[in-house]
């Protein structure tokens, strides 16, 4: 009985210590939306929040999706890959399936980074499709 009680007490201490040492990343200054985040812009903090980013390295080089305020933990949905295509930008769209391959021009309807989905209007047909941004700035549709 004493052994079980001691074990439970030890477990509570370990869990409490984990909560005390939980870290998040907070901005040093206000970071505007669509700005790249540098190493000097953020610091580790003892404050914690659900969905908060825990490591500075995970934030550096990312783009702020919303304005980030000093002292508030940065949440994972507030940052993302830097935008490679801007809204209203002309881009090449690629579609491939089996032996069929189509390439045409489109106009982006949103901002997006590599690997993110973006809506694009096909300039020839005026149809709106969704595609993934490739590293060269073109859009792969139909996957």
Image (cartoon, grey):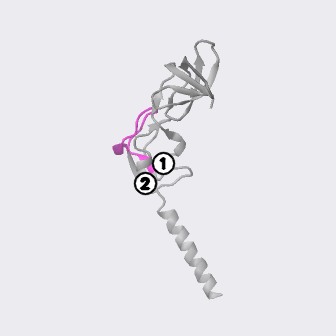
Structural crowding at the residue carrying mark 1, measured as other residues with C-alpha within 10 Å and reported as few (<14), some (14–19) or many (≥20): many
State the quadrant of the C terminus: top right
Q: Earlier in the sequence, mark 1 or mark 2?
A: 2
Q: Is residue 90 above or below residue 71?
A: above
Say which residue appears at 33% left-offset and 44% top-offset. Answer: 40
Label 1 close to label 2 by CB (< 8 Å)? yes
> Which type of secondary structure does the marked residue at label 2 adopt?
strand
Please tell me which residue lies in front, 12 or 80. 80
Q: How far apart are marks 1 and 2 (CA)?
A: 8 Å
Say which residue appears at 55% left-offset and 49% top-offset. Answer: 51
State which region is magenta. Answer: 25-41
Locate residue 120: give its quadrant.
top right
> Which type of secondary structure does the marked residue at label 1 adopt?
loop
Pick out the residue farthest to the top.
Answer: 124
Pick out the residue farthest to the front.
Answer: 99
State the quadrant of the N terminus: bottom right
Q: In this view, does 73 lie above or below 18?
A: above
- State the count of labels: 2
Compared across the picture, whether 106 is left or right of 4 comes to left
Please tell me which residue lies in front, 94 or 14. 94
Q: Does the magenta stretch include residue 39?
A: yes
Compared across the picture, whether 24 is left or right of 127 comes to left
- Residue occupied by mark 1: 73
- Residue occupied by mark 2: 45
Q: Position of residue 67 (x, y in %)?
A: 47, 36
Structural crowding at the residue carrying mark 2, measured as other residues with C-alpha within 10 Å and reported as few (<14), some (14–19) or many (≥20): some
Q: Where is residue 138 in the image (x, y as percent from the top left)?
A: 50, 25
Kindly report the secondary structure that dominates the magenta region of the rendered protein. Answer: loop
């Amino acid at each position: 009985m004493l052994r079980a009680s001691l074990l439970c007490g030890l477990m509570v201490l370990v869990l409490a210590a984990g909560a005390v040492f939980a870290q998040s990343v907070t901005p040093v200054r206000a970071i505007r939306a669509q700005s790249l985040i540098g190493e000097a812009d953020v610091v580790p903090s003892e404050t914690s929040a659900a969905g908060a980013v825990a490591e500075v390295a995970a934030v550096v080089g990312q783009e702020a999706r919303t304005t980030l305020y000093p002292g508030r933990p940065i949440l994972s949905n507030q940052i993302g890959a830097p935008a490679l295509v801007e809204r209203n930008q002309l881009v090449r769209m690629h579609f491939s399936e089996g032996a069929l391959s189509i390439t045409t021009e489109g106009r982006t309807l949103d901002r997006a980074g590599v690997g993110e989905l973006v809506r694009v209007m096909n300039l020839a047909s005026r149809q709106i499709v969704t595609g993934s941004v490739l590293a060269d700035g073109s859009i792969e549709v139909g996957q």
